[in-house]
Amino acid sequence: MTPVELSRTVLCAVRRAVDVGELDVSVPASVAVGLPGPGGCGDYASNIALRLAGQAGRPARDVAEVLRPHIERDPGVAEVTVTGPGFLNITLAGGASAGLVEQVLEQGTRYGYDDTLAGQLVELRVPYDTRAEIVADALVRIVATQGGRAEVRHAEPVNLRPVPAPEDPALLGHDAARWALLHPAAHDRPRISADHLLQRESNPLFRVRYAHARTRALRRNAAALGHSHRHDSHSRAGVLVAVGVPSDASGTGVSPAPVPAGFGTTPAETDLLAALADYPHALRLAARDRAPDRVARHLVVTADAVLGFQYTVLPLGDEKPSAAHRARLALAEAAGAVLAGGLSLLGISAPEYL
């Protein structure tokens, strides 16, 4: 189950609770799920009970307990735990990580696209300023990922005015100049310096572009070894077989199983899976808050996870390719798709070689 699917599951649980008279609230248009916070547990968490508590006239924990059994009815959910003042902590059934990777591979650079702004026109009124125009240009693409349409105009009153750059960023070149203007939050003054051109780990742009290049290199190196994550099939069953989840006896479905071997078995894999799962949420926030820096910062998190994970992907020495290696290669390719997609939204190239 992917984060988008889980969000819909939680929303359906609210609707069912309202339909049977257990809650007297207006069903929200959408429900956000994210990674559990301090004191949380499981794979994902939602604060929907806290959002609905005032409307329901009941403590948030009571609302959460009402929703818990409705969420647990979904076969993709293994357990729901209520923590703190009323957070719903959700543990997914086995195969969830494989489903996430499969979704990214199927959707490619369009992973994370949604319809939360469908039919909405977002008017961006900007001053005659280089940074404002670059930010607006990125927002046109980011808003489109959520089904909306953004129009940019030079008009008053201005509603998008990031702090201007202290000097002309053009000398940095196209990619570094855009990163210098988009990576800082709108209220922060961008730093225009040659540091953005350094080929070292201290440069976030280098890390992001290098991580993408590494995912492409891993695919090329795996092909040279006759090794691919698509070894079994392009189908869902094939992807799950590649990560160690057995098909059912008929060969047409997938048997319930714990988290597949090869996914989430090391901190590096867990960090990378978490980054992929959180990418759609980063896109939604960037579109909602008119903040492309959210996408840039998320790309840095994803890149750092890739760079910590890359050394486990291919067999070492005389080691033969295994299902675990195919799983890790699939995860690396999924991360490459997210990095390429995010850079494209910012108007920055994603190199095959670096």
Image: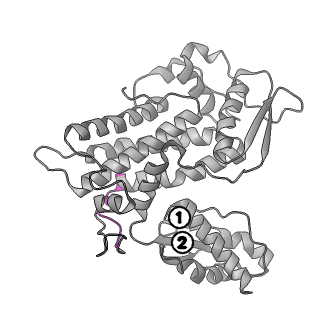
352 or 295, which is in the foreground?
A: 352
Sort mark 2 into few (<14), some (14-19) or many (20+) by Cα contacts within 10 Å: many
Q: Amino acid at mark 2?
A: Asn
Q: Mark 1: few, some, or many residues within 10 Å (few <14, many ≥20)?
A: some
Residue visible at 58% across and 29% down? 347
Secondary structure beneath disc 2? strand
Looking at the image, which residue is at 34% across and 74% down?
A: 255
Q: What element does badge 1 sit on?
A: loop
**In the rendered view, does 98 fall on the left or right side of 15?**
left
Contact between labelled residues 2 and 1, with CB atoms less than 8 Å apart: yes
- In the image, the segment drawn in magenta is 257-268
Which residue is depicted at the point 60% across and 81% down?
70
Question: In the rendered structure, which disc, 1 or 2, sits on the residue that comes first in sequence?
Answer: 1
**Callout 1 amino acid:** Pro
At horizontal 32% and vertical 57% (from top left) the residue drawn is 266
Q: Residue furthest bottom?
A: 21
Q: Which residue is mark 1?
A: 36
Q: Is residue 182 above or below residue 98?
A: above
Q: Quadrant of residue 249?
A: bottom left
Quadrant showing the C terminus? top left
Check disc 2 and report the residue beneath it: 89
Where's residue 154, x and y in %? 83, 26
Task: Report the Cα–Cα distance between label 1 and label 2.
Answer: 7 Å
Which colour assignment does the render follow? one colour
As drawn, the label of residue 312 is none
